Image (cartoon, coloured by chain):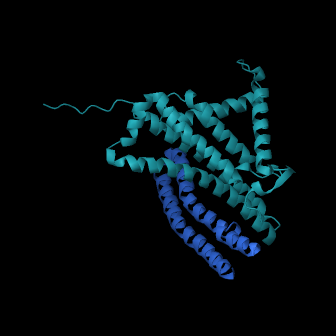
Chain colours: A blue, B cyan
Amino acid sequence: MTLIAIASIITAGLTTGFGCMGPALGEGRAVATALTSLAQQPDASATITRTLFVGLAMIESTAIYCFVVSMILIFANPFWNHVIAQTAGK
Amino acid sequence: MRLSPDQLILWQHGFLKLNATIAFTWGLMLVLAIGSKLITRNLSTELTRSRWQNLLEMVVTGMMKQIKEVGLHNPGTYLGFLGTLFLFIAASSLCTVIPGYEPPTSSLSTTAALALCVFVAVPLFGIEDQGIGGYLKSYAEPTIIMLPFNIISELSRTLALAVRLFGNMMSGAMIIAILLTITPFIFPVFMTVLGLLTGMVQAYIFSILAAVYIAAATRTRKPRPVPATTG
């Protein structure tokens, strides 16, 4: 039981950590490119900003998936519930 | 700590449970339906019109423009479905400024239901536009090898729609709850403002993605450009 707790907490931390790294790099690149094109073409700012927001949200959702997985590991862990049910049954 | 408003049970009688998700969803539906009924009760085409009518006209014309930009050429057909999705998600995240309110979209059941609506609506619109045969044929585009991948993408994008909205809404609520225990003074206010922005962006993305999927299901009817016959 303690082993499951240790494993899930460490895995949850690792999941969010690694899951934030990729999207952070991606969002940085996206914003940098959008700023460059905004500086070159200020007239198209409405389109660029809208597309940027949609793109950022799409990139961000990969980080959100990792966050959801780690939240499930901490607060709604299926293995944990299984073990608790087993020990309660004994 | 609660993961979703599903676990907040307001009323219970036997096996009937009324949780916060259902209560807030019905509340929102009532507010949206009664509100639009009241506003559209006396519409005017004169120069003077009520402020609420102006607001609704702005919302409706804005949505029509966005749907048209995605590539659906008569937006009126799809406005009922896409507009309802947008208005519901936007209202449910805008109402978070009310204390004690929890957005029903931060429960996976609500977002899964919304995503299932899109999952059902896309083939319906596709069949309505190009017939059953034509729609089924679009799964085998560009070659028959792509058939399993097209079906997988149909399922996985439904899952992604549901989890994306749920994750964004849930993380907003959770971050505010965590910050309230660490820095309870000013900082949560800024995170709430950021949450409002994320909520609007997510509502926009959800409806735009649904529009893009519908456009992909209906677009194939347009005649392909005939390759120029060069002698």
Residue A53 seen by the camera: no
- Residue located farthest toward the top when viewing the structure as drawn: B46
Front residue of B183 and B205: B205
Q: Total of numbered circles in the picture?
A: 0
- Residue A64, x across and y down, in percent: 60, 61
Residue drawn at point x = 32 percent, y = 32 percent: B224
Front residue of A43 and B132: B132
Q: Is residue A87 above or below residue B3?
A: below
Front residue of A80 and B163: A80
- Residue A12, x across and y down, in percent: 62, 73
Image quadrant holding the N terminus of chain A, namely bottom right
Q: Is residue A16 above or below residue B12?
A: below
On screen, residue A55 versus residue B50, left or right, reads: left
- Residue B98, x across and y down, in percent: 82, 50
On screen, residue B113 versus residue B51, left or right, reads: left
Residue drawn at point x = 16 percent, y = 32 percent: B230
Residue drawn at point x = 50 percent, y = 55 percent: A34
